[in-house]
Image: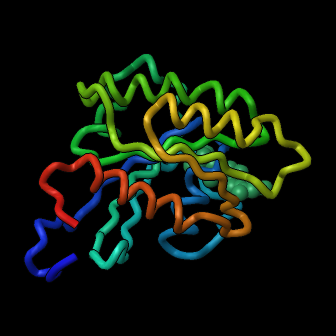
């Protein structure tokens, strides 16, 4: 409660989107920031997207780093900028691709290693719910993994714009929740 002017708010939220190639990271970021579903976005592109929004009556300027193909995970120096100075992380897999789900724990460990933290604000996202007939990961499996990682969980469809705003909103809430200087 209280006067927004008196809040110790952070204005800018720098986040990074992680996940296996092809899970829909770019589609989610573009749907969120531009309300466009871009079917053929270059998988090698690393891009950032900005969007001004209001969450729980408090302004947030989102700065989203959409990471490119990351087969080169072993070369951590080259991926360091993906975590440096970031406030929170979105970990994305495809509900129609078990392998992308199994990759999440590895990516989470990379984030903790690079941020040198025991925990980080994260949201786990199971994308492509429109492909329910090809589902390989249950909602319960996703939910359980999010609990293990200590983050929120949502299933989304970037294609149909289902839960797209919500997953970024939840990430802002997680960042605020983990910020001792933030007073709602
Ligand atoms: P990235 O490599 O994680 O950035 O994945 P992209 O955002 O480039 O998406 C890879 C492919 O998955 C694209 O060609 C999209 O057509 C498709 N895709 C992304 N999101 C969805 C979704 O929600 N549903 C379906 N059916 N396909 C999607
Ligand atoms: Mg991409």
Q: Is residue 62 left or right of residue 23?
A: left
Q: Nearer the viewer, residue 22 or 132?
A: 132
The quarter of the picture where the C terminus appears is bottom left
Q: How many marks?
A: 0
Q: Is residue 127 left or right of residue 172?
A: right
Most distant residue in the left direction: 6
| Residue 67 visible somewhere in the drawing | no
The quarter of the picture where the N terminus appears is bottom left
Q: Position of residue 91 (x, y in %)?
A: 51, 41
Which color scheme did the rendering employ for the protein? rainbow
Please say if 60 is above or below 82: below
Residue 59, by quadrant, is: bottom left
Most distant residue in the front direction: 1
Q: Is residue 160 left or right of residue 25?
A: right
Q: Position of residue 159 (x, y in %)?
A: 72, 64
Most distant residue in the right direction: 133
Q: Position of residue 40 (x, y in %)?
A: 68, 58
Which residue occupies 21% across, 50% down?
A: 179
Please say if 49 is above or below 175: below
Most distant residue in the top direction: 74
Which residue occupies 36% across, 59% down?
A: 172
Which residue occupies 32% across, 31% down?
A: 119
Which residue occupies 37% across, 30% down?
A: 111
| Residue 56 visible somewhere in the drawing | yes
Q: Nearer the viewer, residue 45 or 4?
A: 4
Q: Position of residue 78 (x, y in %)?
A: 34, 29
Residue 118, by quadrant, is: top left
């Amino acid at each position: 409660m209280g006067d927004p002017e008196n809040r110790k708010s952070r204005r800018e939220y720098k986040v990074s989107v992680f996940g296996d190639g092809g899970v829909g990271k770019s589609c989610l970021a573009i749907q969120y920031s531009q309300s466009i579903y871009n079917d053929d976005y270059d998988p090698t592109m690393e891009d950032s997207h900005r969007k001004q929004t209001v969450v729980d009556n408090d302004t947030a300027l989102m700065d989203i780093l959409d990471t490119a193909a990351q087969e080169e995970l072993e070369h951590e120096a080259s991926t360091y900028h993906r975590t440096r100075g970031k406030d929170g992380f979105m970990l994305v897999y495809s509900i129609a691709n078990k392998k992308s789900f199994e990759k999440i724990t590895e990516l989470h460990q990379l984030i903790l290693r690079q941020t040198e933290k025991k925990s980080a604000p994260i949201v786990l996202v199971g994308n492509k719910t429109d492909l329910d007939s090809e589902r390989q990961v249950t909602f319960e499996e996703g939910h359980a993994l999010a609990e293990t990682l200590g983050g929120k969980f949502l299933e989304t469809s970037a294609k149909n714009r289902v839960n797209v705003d919500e997953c970024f909103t939840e990430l802002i809430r997680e960042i605020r929740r983990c910020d001792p200087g933030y007073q709602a």
